[in-house]
Amino acid sequence: MVEGPASRDWVCLGVMVGAHGVRGLVKVKSFTETPADVAAYGPVSDKSGRRRWTLQVTGPAPGKRDVVLAKLEGVSDRDAAQALHGTELYVARSALPALAEEETFYHADLIGLRVEDPEGRELGKVAAVENYGAGDFLEVERPDGKLLLLAFTRAVVPEVDVAGGRLVALPPAEIEVPPEGARPED
């Protein structure tokens, strides 16, 4: 059983995307609704769980809506900050607040869900949740290995059953759904 950040008991709140200045500030792309909340849930860990930091947000990064500047405990110069580029920041899921609204989800809960059409035919599995500025998209890995992007809206995804491990999607008309039981090469 995995105990560290690689398990589903941990949630990635952001990723370090570079250094800022010469005193060890890092730029953190935040995955939280309010970018500064990347530091609101206690110390963060890297994916391995071996490195742990207290993160203090000092302000927004110039010109970037979802990037904040932060000070990491023990990081005091530009070289040390730049060496952390690409490091994902995790917290224990138990540190996050319970979701207050129905039909709101942590992205981590959606990844891995089986995606079905309304007739129950498998379209694939959610591989990632992306946001390119116009709302969330589900990246679905299809059984044939190809990727499908679906807008994460009620119109396209009318049902999400996290406990049941599935969601129902209404793919656009140009997406062909193979008949039940068909192999990808059929």
Image: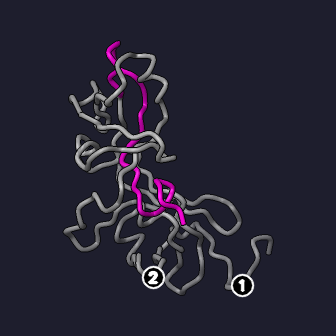
Q: How is the structure coloured here?
A: one colour
In the displayed structure, would residue 173 be above or below residue 147?
below
Please state, as top left, top right, bottom left or bottom right, where the C terminus lies in the image. Answer: bottom right
Q: Which residues are magenta?
A: 1-26
Sequence-first tag of 2 and 1: 2
Identify residue type, mark 2. Gly
Residue with the mark numbered 2: 164
In the displayed structure, would residue 21 be above or below residue 142?
above
**In this picture, residue 121 sits left or right of residue 131:** right
**Residue 138 or residue 68, whichever sits in front:** 68
| Magenta-span inclusion, residue 7 | yes
Secondary structure, mark 2, is loop
Residue with the mark numbered 1: 181
In the displayed structure, would residue 83 be above or below residue 177?
above
**Residue 166 or residue 181, whichever sits in front:** 166
Query: Residue 2 placed where, x, y %?
Result: 53, 62
In the displayed structure, would residue 160 be above or below residue 22?
below
Secondary structure, mark 1, is loop
Query: Residue 39 placed where, x, y %?
Result: 26, 42
Q: Looking at the image, which residue is at 60% across and 78% down?
A: 122
Please state, as top left, top right, bottom left or bottom right, where the N terminus lies in the image. Answer: bottom right
- Mark 2: give few (<14), some (14-19) or many (20+) Cα within 10 Å: few
Q: Looking at the image, which residue is at 26% across and 47% down?
A: 42
Q: Quadrant of residue 76?
A: top left
Q: Are marks 2 and 1 in contact (CB under 8 Å)?
A: no
Query: Residue 49 placed where, x, y %?
Result: 47, 47
